[in-house]
Image: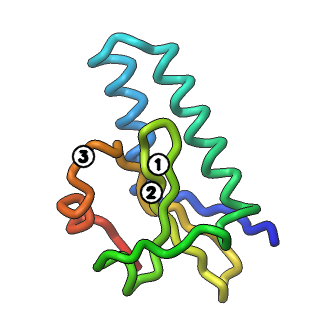
């Protein structure tokens, strides 16, 4: 089943910050564009295979039925809303960041 994708404002903000950091701080605008394209492609792919990804077993993610996938060293956090028939992209976070600490600021619902 193909789901519509809803990228939350938090996830859009994450993508913007990732692009700006790589382009400006690291001085690699073409790399920033390539990573954002890969991330957006990975997000689009969730429309067709979000159901095949398991829930994250750790709390607080599991309680809220949050899933994640990895694309180019970035975790894409999402949840499938069966009532709305939609995949909600919650956040996009660099994989080497402290994920549990970052979960405290995530809007999991």
Q: Is 105 situated above or below 42?
A: below
- Mark 1 is surrounded, within 10 Å at the Cα level, by few (under 14), some (14 to 19) or many (20 or more) other residues, namely some
Quadrant in the rendering for residue 56: bottom left
Whichever of labels 3 and 1 marks the residue nearer the N terminus, that label is 1
Q: Which mark is residue 21?
A: none
Residue at x 51%, y 14% (from the top left corner): 30
Question: In the structure shown, which secondary structural element does the residue marked by tag 2 occupy?
Answer: helix
Along the viewing direction, whichever of 66 and 81 lies nearer the viewer: 66
Display colour scheme? rainbow
Instruction: Name the residue that disc number 3 marks.
Output: 97
Residue 102 screen position, x and y as percent: 23, 59
Asked if the residue at tag 1 contacts the one at tag 3, i.e. Cβ–Cβ closer than 8 Å, the answer is no
Which residue is tagged 2?
9
CA distance for labels 1 and 2:
5 Å
Mark whose residue sits in front, 3 or 1: 3
Whichever of labels 2 and 3 marks the residue nearer the N terminus, that label is 2
Q: Quadrant of residue 26?
A: top left
Q: Residues within 10 Å of mark 3 (few under 14, many from 20)?
A: few
Q: Give the Cα distance between marks 2 and 3.
A: 20 Å
Expressed as whole percent of the image width and height from the top left, the position of residue 86 reads 66, 73
Residue in front for this viewpoint, 29 or 96 = 96
C-alpha gap between disc 3 and disc 1: 18 Å
Residue 75, how many percent across, how many down? 43, 51
Residue at the extreme right of the image, as rendered? 1
Instruction: Say above or below: 102 vs 109.
Output: above
Instruction: Say which element carries label 1.
Output: helix
Q: Position of residue 59 (x, y in %)?
A: 29, 79
Residue at x 28%, y 42% (from the top left corner)? 96
What residue is disc 1 on?
12
Which element is circle 3 on?
A: loop
Please tell me how many numbered marks the rendered image carries. Answer: 3
């Amino acid at each position: 089943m193909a789901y519509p994708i809803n990228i939350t404002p938090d996830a859009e903000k994450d993508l913007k910050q990732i692009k700006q950091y790589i382009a400006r701080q690291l001085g690699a605008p073409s790399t920033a564009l390539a990573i954002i394209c890969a991330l957006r492609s990975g997000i689009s792919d969730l429309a067709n295979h979000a159901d095949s990804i398991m829930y994250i077993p750790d709390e607080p993610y599991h309680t809220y039925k949050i899933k994640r996938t990895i694309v180019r060293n970035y975790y894409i956090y999402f949840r499938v809303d069966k009532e709305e028939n939609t995949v909600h992209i919650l956040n996009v976070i660099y994989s080497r960041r402290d994920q549990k600490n970052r979960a405290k600021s995530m809007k999991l619902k």
